[in-house]
Amino acid sequence: MRDRLAEVGFTEARADTIVASVSGDIDGSNAAELRRAVAERVPSTARSLIMDLTATTYIDSTGVELLFELARRLSARRQIFTVVVPKGSGVRKVLELCDIGSVAILVESQGDGLEAVDAA
Amino acid sequence: MADRGWIEGEDPSLPEGGTPDPGGDAILGAALEGLRRAAEEVEVERSTAETLQRSLLRERLPDVPGLRLAARYLPGSGEARIGGDWYDAIPLRDGRVGLVIGDVVGRGIEAAARMAHLQSAVRAYALEGLRPSLILERMNGFVQELESRGTATLLLAVVDPDAETVRLASAGHPPPLIVDPDGNSSFAEGPAGNPLGASLFPSYDETVMAMPTGSALVLYTDGIVERPDQALDVGMEILADLGLSLPDEPDEACRTLLDRLLADGLAHDDVALLIARLDAPPLTLDLVVPADPTSLVGVRRGLGRWLRAIGVGDADAYELQVACGEACANAIAHAYPPGDAHFAVRAVREGSELLIEVGDFGAWRPPRGGSGGRGLALIEQLTDSLEIDRGIAGTTVRMRRKMEGMAPS
């Protein structure tokens, strides 16, 4: 039996903003499938994607790569990409070491994420 | 099989003294033929049920770091006494594992088929992350919905190797035996609960028990403790006594229990047995795992548990898990000939320093852009030193990090 490790849930915070919340671990065993699952759920008409990693317990470089690829895809369509990660978490540290801030807006809550979308 | 049946042995329907008179009564001959055919049908049903039953039980239990598992299923020796008992081990999130043992009332193909339904349903509910008491409630509803009615007993034990606890919930199943690290054995306390399907609105309780490193948990079905010539409580007493000198290795422990509890080596009723032992974290962590991305989580959890056991804090442990994970991902990405490829992870403390080595048996390849380069950069940022030893036999990635506040060795 294969452990999926992570779950992803989708909500529409607003008509133009998709929120993808990932709980669990993201690693080389599920990152590619997770990227496809998220990419499929973001229509070209959406204004922005908020990736909420508050409940993400682990991320490695394949998970970071997933975020960079999503960022490339979104920026090609002029969509805003926001990543929610609480301060002080291990996931935050890994994302900062990989300079995710160069391709996405890094915030600490979904509310901050929506404000960032409005300001952008 | 024939040696267990009466067809070729003594025939209880025959008068004392043995074989029918060859020139004898035609009616007796026809009756015997009928009996023989009925016996063959029983035998076919029996072997079909056994095949079904065996195909449903995991031959290989999952690898859970820190937990050693072994299980057995034995068909009953009685007529068509097969089917209905099962065990399962389901890896859950966060390194916990759900252990399952159950007994469907009934015999033969029908019981084996109902057991298959129940086994799938428990897996599905467990993977949803539901708590054990809620899983039992849902299972009760599930059994009520099944077309072929009947009750079943079920015990769930969710073992958390990190917290060293086990969370138990029972639907009318005999309590598991817990053997503590000093070798004392006792049955888990807690309400037995209603068997599944026995009541429309049952309620199930959960009991959380300490399961310190070195403890063993013995889950079983009543076939192992109950015999026609022996009451259930007598068998349980014998089981508790055997628990006092239970072999460390679960596989050997299973063998010992079956040898000692089943007097003639045969089970009258069918028997399922599942033993789990929580291992002490070793001084040196040594893992050898298949070169596949699905191995990453096991290494990560094994390393995390080992690091916590030697006193490394959560934040440091997380960073070392990431560094080690990147080295493992690199080992997995290296070209291997198709087939059975593995890589090795070793972690050891050297004074105030931690050394983690990831060795593969392939040739080093420079990372190809993307996450490969990013992974190596992460290792460099999260450790104090990184060496890559590209040997002929394989590549070893050696990472060191100074640790403050580790528990004294």
Image (spheres, coloured by chain):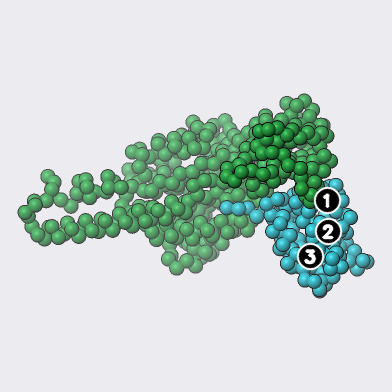
Front in this rendered view, residue B48 or B113: B48
Front in this rendered view, residue B247 or A4: A4
Callout 2 amino acid? Val
Front in this rendered view, residue B379 or A89: B379
**Pointer 3: what residue?**
A19
Q: Earlier in the sequence, mark 2 or mark 3?
A: 3
Distance (Cα) linking label 2 and label 3: 10 Å
* Left or right of B114, for residue B405: right
Q: Tell which chain the image draws in cyan.
A: A
Who's the residue at 87% across and 68% down the image? A78
Q: Mark 2 and mark 1 in contact (Cβ < 8 Å)?
A: yes
Who's the residue at 60% across and 35% down the image? B279
**Pointer 1: what residue?**
A95
Find numbered disc 2 in the image and state the secondary structure of the residue it sits on. strand
Distance (Cα) linking label 1 and label 2: 10 Å
Callout 1 amino acid? Leu
* Left or right of B191, for residue B161: right
Q: Earlier in the sequence, mark 1 or mark 2?
A: 2
Q: Tell which chain the image draws in green.
A: B
Distance (Cα) linking label 3 and label 1: 19 Å
Front in this rendered view, residue B282 or B407: B282
- Is residue B347 something that shows in the picture? no
Residue B55 position, x and y percent, is 45, 53
Q: Residue furthest right?
A: A119
Binning the other alpha carbons within 10 Å of mark 1 as few (below 14), some (14 to 19) or many (20 upward) gives: many
Residue B241 position, x and y percent, is 46, 34
Q: Earlier in the sequence, mark 3 or mark 1?
A: 3
Who's the residue at 68% across and 35% down the image? B394
Who's the residue at 39% across and 61% down the image? B110
Find numbered disc 3 in the image and state the secondary structure of the residue it sits on. strand
**Pointer 2: what residue?**
A83
